[in-house]
Amino acid sequence: MIKLYDGGAWLIDGKDLVPDSPQAGEIIQNKYGKAVPDKKEAAKNTIAYSILKDHNTSENMDDLRIKFDKLTSHDITFVGIIQTARASGLEKFPIPYVLTNCHNSLCAVGGTINEDDHMFGLTCAKRYGGVYVPPHQAVIHQFAREMLAEGGKMILGSDSHTRYGALGTMAMGEGGPELVKQLLGRTYDIKCPEVVGIYLTGKPVPGVGPQDVALAIIGAVFANGYVKNKVMEFVGPGVENLSADFRIGIDVMTTETTCLSSIWKTDSAIKDFYDIHGRSQAYKELNPGPVTYYNGLVYVELDKIRPMIAMPFHPSNTYTIEELNANLMDILEDVEKKAQVSLDGKIPYTLKDKVRDGKLYVDQGIIAGCAGGGFENICDAADILRGSSIGFDAFTLSIYPASTPIYMELAKNGVLADLLETGAVVKTAFCGPCFGAGDTPANNALSIRHSTRNFPNREGSKIQDGQISSVALMDARSIAATAANKGRLTPATEFAGEYRHPQYHFDKTIYENRVFDSKGKADPEVEIQFGPNIKDWPEMPSLTDNLVLKVVSEIHDPVTTTDELIPSGETSSYRSNPLKLAEFALSRKDPAYVGLAKEVQGAEKAREAGECPACAFTELKPVWDKIKEAYPDMNRQNTGVGSTIFAVKPGDGSAREQAASCQKVLGGWANIANEYATKRYRSNLINWGMLPFLIPEGELPFKKGDYLFIPDIRKAVEEGAKEVKAYTVGDSLKEFTLGLGDMTEDEREIILEGCLINYYKSGK
């Protein structure tokens, strides 16, 4: 079904594979009559390399400085991004910037603050020359597919699922500060990423959908980091057997592999997509070169994939539905054990009570958002459900088309009526079910969802309040098959009926009537509309010569998600208010964190005011005195005080910058980790002036509550040191080493200045 190559692979004429070996060159020459370039040259024949080269502004393809063609954000992120850019000198949007409103659409939490954010976005689109998509019109990624994507172009979005590779657009999801850099004419700076080929063969059997293929790939590559921070390039003869919608459904889930980006070869199916959407000029044929080298290869046999399920609490916790049903109690036992790691054993958790007469019954089905809300997903689900009923018991089914044009077509072709007749509820375009702001199930309920993630609390429950429900990810087709059986878990391959595959007709009239498009023209006379919740960022100090840090949280989960660092759901309403949002930091993982961080921050505020930090926080005095014995030149002028957290592997999941900025707002100076789950989380730390320290796995020379002293840290950053000396402060100073990893010159400058805002204010 899925095979990972141990090494690299050669692709000949986009069709034939030759595994890398000492004999590979001879095989290619003799069998195919091809001249064989060296690996570095052959790697330049990937689609990804050609697009990156076209967008690189440096003269060095090893160290890229990328300028994107377009930007996109939604209403959880665009306020903070624009506020940061305004504080850094923004005058107009230099490239197309689309502000969608698909997360805080319901305006149900926090009084007027969600709609205040929307009005902020509309007036900023007018003032700075952007595009504003009102609530309920489209989820961010569907609008980008329909109206923004172009072959061979690059899009940067402030949402981790910014993936339009199936349409020939290399797209990346990053934290807000990376978009700020683009708005200010700066670049996205990375080492040239490796490219992994995703070689597709065969054709999916009826009942297998894009989520099934995506989950199978995620299950194979996530744990071993096979594609981490690399580009996934989809090639092979199986690509032509997939519709555009099917490819899009796989592509959007590549984020869950922790890859950097994705790109697909394009063909007539993608040309038809652009034709249907009235943008034929946006199509570009993309193919790898005659002899192409990939740094790794994932071999996917589409015909062997069966309906999949990702059990709580991660998209990589995958099984076939048939396997789960055949080994139900054993797998549920394993899932419950894994869950207790994610939940820290804070709350009882079981799924065994969902088993009746040897069958697993679920409580809710959701088909939604950028992953599930596509036209083909919904039409296939309707075919499975047609003529049946979801029943009148606890089970519910909600469907969210990804855009109003899709909704309109479902209404015109009768699918909407078919769905409503079954008891399903069809709602407007909204991302809420994907991040815990819509359709929260009952306590102890299990929801099956064609959405993007199933982390703890991602469905909206609150462990800190004793609530727990959970999500399993599935494809829309198997969700429909399960719904037709009143909640009994059922793979869609059991459906023996006909899939009608109606033709899609895109009508952009609703966009022409409702979407504000400045056509790139800024109007500086427009006054930005601020709500009372929209606040500026607090002042942030620059990096001092030395640091004293208190470890205020210690997390030993194998992976810590951004949802655990800053919760999603109702907290999203406060993302326009840095101080208010910071109160929620780590609230679901370590409720004591905020209070402990604030105590230490009191000492730093005293220091910045010219007072004695140890006098403001008496717990610090013996620590300060002990350090002074070894470092008599250390004083309040040259030594900052702050907090830090340790986590094994933080930052999996969302691109949200607030996972880092909230720690900074509370006085955080650093994270310490064995590794960072994603490039975007490490970038978020750096952009908010936080040091991304590393320690070897298995070594932990400190514990929660300990104080650390890091002398000459400013000098180390200035000089680009890879390691720094640090001490645990107790009865004596015990030395250990912290790694800093590779940082670009700009990244070092940002940390030295204290954050990206300070960096721009300094005129650098």
Image: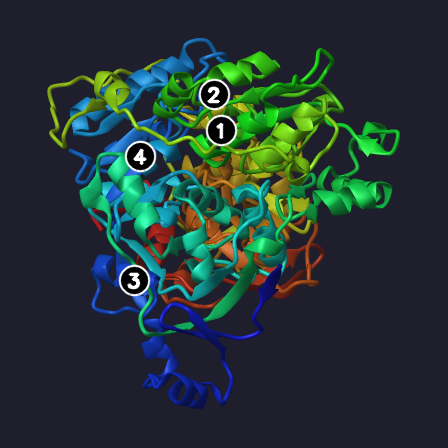
Secondary structure under tag 1 reads helix
Q: Residue 721 falls in which quadrant of the image?
A: bottom left
Residue linked to disc 3: 64
Q: Amino acid at mark 2?
A: Val
Q: Residues within 10 Å of mark 2 (few under 14, many from 20)?
A: many
Q: Amino acid at mark 3?
A: Leu
Task: Give the mark, 1 or 4, whose residue is nearer the N terminus.
Answer: 4
**Distance CA(mark 1)–CA(mark 4):** 18 Å
Secondary structure under tag 2 reads helix
Position of 2 with respect to 757 (left or right) is right
Residue linked to disc 1: 379
Q: Position of residue 336 (x, y in %)?
A: 80, 40
Q: Are marks 1 and 2 in contact (CB under 8 Å)?
A: yes
Q: Is residue 537 visible?
A: no
Task: Give the mark, 1 or 2, whose residue is nearer the N terminus.
Answer: 1
Q: Amino acid at mark 4?
A: Glu
- Tell me the tag on residue 146: 4
Q: Are marks 3 and 1 in contact (CB under 8 Å)?
A: no
Task: Give the mark, 3 or 1, whose residue is nearer the N terminus.
Answer: 3
**Distance CA(mark 1)–CA(mark 2):** 7 Å
Secondary structure under tag 3 reads strand
- Tell me the tag on residue 496: none
Q: Amino acid at mark 1?
A: Cys
